[in-house]
Image (cartoon, rainbow, N blue to C red):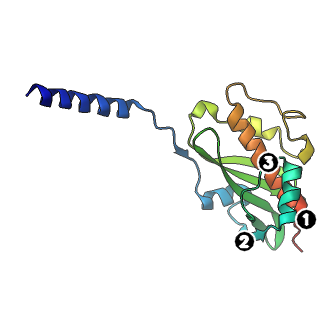
Amino acid sequence: MKFLKSCYLLLFLILSLAMAIPAYAKIYYSKQEAMELAFGSEATVEMMSLFLTDSDVEKIQQLARVKVDSALFTFYVGKKAGELIGYAAIETHKVRTKPETLLIVLNAQGQLTQVQTLAFHEPPEYQPSQRWYAQMFNLPLEDISFRAKIQGISGATLSSRSAIDSVRKVLAVYQTLKIRET
């Protein structure tokens, strides 16, 4: 009987601890909502799948200073009344131990105009703000770095570094492949 009580007590403690662990996972926007954020509700969005060659991957890695994990890359192309609005990419990466998904939007000229967090599974205090993302807008790729014009975030170094890496990768893919809609 004493053994059974000890087992129940142990089970109770384990369940109590499990419930005390905070759940941080937060999904802000679906893919459809993300496309509306990028291009507006009246835009048509087409998916553009790009197959990177080995030389493309090498050049992108050199420009972005990040590793390219896949030779397949997808841009979403937004158009309104037949006119090109811009390009969007959805990038998922690990921050510390959990994933973050960003929507990275370029205008028709290939300049960064928007970064939105679609999902963030780390603690919320590590998430960069929209104001922080805004400092990257319209900057050339070489200036999007802590060594150049980007200010860091105290206490959120890993998430801000991950965001910069994703933005640099998207811009490098755009520049390397010279994507232009005709």
- Does 46 appear above or below 122? below
Judging depth in this view, the residue of 123 and 98 nearest the camera is 98
Image coordinates of residue 104 in percent, x first then y, are 75, 52
User: In the visual, does 125 lie left or right of 53?
Assistant: left
Residue 58 seen in the current view: yes
Image: 60 above or below 99: below
Q: Is residue 129 visible?
A: no
Which class describes the residues within 10 Å of circle 3: few (<14), some (14-19), or many (20+)?
some
Location of residue 85 in the rendering, given as x and y in whole percent from the top left corner: 82, 63
**Can you name the residue that lies furthest to the left here?**
1
Q: Can you give x and y, in whole percent of width and height, for residue 22 in the image?
A: 45, 33
User: Please, what is the three-letter code of the amino acid marked with disc 1?
Assistant: Lys
* Residue highlighted by disc 1: 178
Few, some or many residues within 10 Å of mark 2 (<14, 14–19, 20+): few
Instruction: From this view, report whether residue 18 is shown above or below residue 73.
Output: above
Task: Please tell me whether mark 3 or mark 1 is closer to you in this view.
Answer: 3
Q: Badges 3 and 2: C-beta atoms under 8 Å apart? A: no
Residue located beneath label 3 in the image: 66
* Sequence-first disc among 3 and 1: 3
Q: Quadrant of residue 48?
A: bottom right
User: On the rendered image, what quadrant is the N terminus found in?
Assistant: top left
Give the label, 2 or 1, closer to the camera: 1
Q: Residue 128 carries which label?
A: none
Left or right relative to 67: residue 108: right
**Badge 2 is on which residue?**
46
Q: Which amino acid does label 3 sit on?
A: Val
**Mark found first going from the N terminus, 3 or 2:** 2
Q: Distance between the residues labelled 3 and 1?
A: 19 Å
- Residue shown at the point (58%, 57%) measured from the top left: 30
Q: Which element is circle 3 on?
A: loop
Amino acid type assigned to the residue bearing label 2 in the image: Glu
